[in-house]
Image (tube, rainbow, N blue to C red):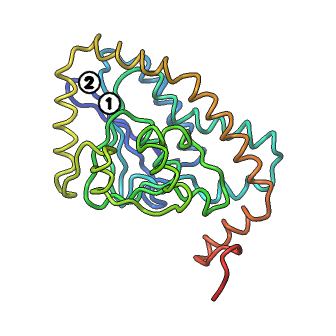
C-alpha cells in the first residue's frame, strides 16, 4: 500500500516535513492516513533535535477533508461505534499537538472540512493564491468535527466561524490573510520559498523558550479541546444515524443537490 504520509527532513534534521500523499483523491483523510499520522507521531517523539513540523499536501490540494466512502459506511454502524471511531480519528491527526513543537502548514488548492480544521489546529499557516478554505459539514448533514467547533472560532472569531460553518462557503486566501488566519499569501511557484523563510525565522527563536510557550498554550487548551472532541464525536455519530446524512452524501457523489434543497 502506498504511504499516504511522506517524511522529509531539512535544516539538519531540526525540521520534519509531513506530506499528505494521496493526490488522486485530493488528500482526503481516511483511516489509512490516520494510521500514518499516528505512526509519524510515534517516530517524531523519538526524533532527536526536533524543532518544527511542517505539513503540506501533494497534488492539486492540501486536503479535501474526510473521505466520503469512509463516511458513508458510518450509516451502517451503531452510534456507540461511530462515537468511539470518530474520537480515535480526530486524535490520530491532532495528536501532533502533543509534541509541543511548532506546527506549520503550507496550504494550496482546496482545504476542506477536516483538512481545514486540522490546519486551524496548527500554529502558523502560509498559502498560495489557489487556496480555498471551507467547512461544509452542515451541507453534508454533519456536525463539525476534527476540533473545528473550537479551532475555527479561535482562529476567526465566533461570528466569522459561525458564518463559515452555517453556509459552507469557500473563503479565498486574501480574505483569510486579512482576517489573520494566514501569515502570508504568495504565488504557487513561491509557496515553497515562503514556507522555508517562515521555518528559518521560527528556528531563530530559542528552542527551550519556544517549547515552554507551546507547552503552556497546549496545557491551557487541553481541557476544552478534549471536551470539544468528545462532543463532536457524539454529535457526528448522531448525524450518521439520520436519513438526511446518507441522502446528502449520495447526492454529493452524484454531483446533485441534496434532498433538502428545493428544486426550481
Position of residue 152 in the picture relative to residue 57 (left or right): right
Cα gap from disc 1 to disc 2, whole angstroms: 7 Å
Whole-percent x, y for residue 154 in the image = 45, 37
Which quarter of the picture shows residue 50? top left
Q: Which mark is residue 13?
A: 2
Q: Which residue is mark 1?
A: 16
Task: Find numbered disc 2 in the image and state the secondary structure of the residue it sits on.
Answer: loop
* Within-10-Å neighbours for mark 1: few <14, some 14–19, many 20+: many
Residue 217 coordinates in the image, percent (x, y): 42, 21
Residue furthest to the front: 159
Question: Nearest the camera: 122 or 20?
Answer: 122
- What is the secondary structure assignment of the residue under circle 1? strand
Q: Residue furthest right?
A: 78
Q: Is residue 222 left or right of residue 178?
A: right
**Along the line of sight, which residue is nearer the eye, 143 or 81?**
143
Q: Are marks 1 and 2 in contact (CB under 8 Å)?
A: yes
* Rendered-image quadrant of the C terminus: bottom right
Residue 55 in percent (x, y) is at 36, 40
Where residue 7 sits, quadrant-wise, is top left
Query: Which residue does the image show at 50% across and 56% down from the upper left?
Result: 163
Amino acid at each position: 500500500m502506498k504511504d499516504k504520509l511522506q517524511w522529509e527532513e531539512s535544516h539538519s534534521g531540526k525540521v520534519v516535513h509531513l506530506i499528505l500523499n494521496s493526490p488522486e483523491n485530493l488528500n482526503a483523510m481516511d483511516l489509512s492516513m490516520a494510521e500514518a499520522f499516528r505512526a509519524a507521531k510515534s517516530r517524531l517523539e523519538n526524533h532527536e533535535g526536533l524543532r518544527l513540523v511542517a505539513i503540506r499536501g501533494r497534488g492539486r490540494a492540501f486536503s479535501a477533508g474526510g473521505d466520503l466512502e469512509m463516511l458513508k459506511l458510518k450509516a451502517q454502524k451503531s452510534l456507540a461505534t461511530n462515537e468511539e471511531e470518530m474520537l480515535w480519528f480526530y486524535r490520530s491527526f491532532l495528536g501532533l499537538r502533543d509534541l509541543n513543537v511548532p506546527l506549520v502548514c503550507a496550504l494550496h488548492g482546496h482545504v476542506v472540512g477536516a483538512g481545514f480544521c486540522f490546519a486551524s489546529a496548527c500554529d502558523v499557516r502560509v498559502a498560495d493564491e489557489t487556496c480555498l478554505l471551507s467547512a461544509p459539514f452542515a451541507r453534508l448533514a454533519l456536525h463539525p468535527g476534527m476540533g473545528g467547533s473550537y479551532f475555527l472560532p479561535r482562529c476567526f472569531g465566533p461570528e466569522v466561524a459561525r458564518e463559515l460553518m452555517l453556509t459552507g462557503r469557500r473563503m479565498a486566501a486574501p480574505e483569510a490573510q486579512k482576517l489573520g488566519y494566514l501569515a502570508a499569501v504568495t504565488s504557487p511557484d513561491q509557496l515553497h520559498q515562503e514556507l522555508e523563510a517562515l521555518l528559518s525565522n521560527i528556528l531563530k527563536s530559542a528552542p527551550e523558550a519556544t517549547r515552554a510557550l507551546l507547552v503552556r498554550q497546549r496545557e491551557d487548551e487541553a481541557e476544552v479541546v478534549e471536551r470539544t472532541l468528545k462532543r463532536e464525536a457524539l454529535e457526528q455519530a448522531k448525524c450518521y444515524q439520520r436519513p438526511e446524512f446518507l441522502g446528502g452524501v449520495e447526492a454529493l457523489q452524484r454531483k446533485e443537490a441534496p434532498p433538502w434543497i428545493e428544486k426550481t
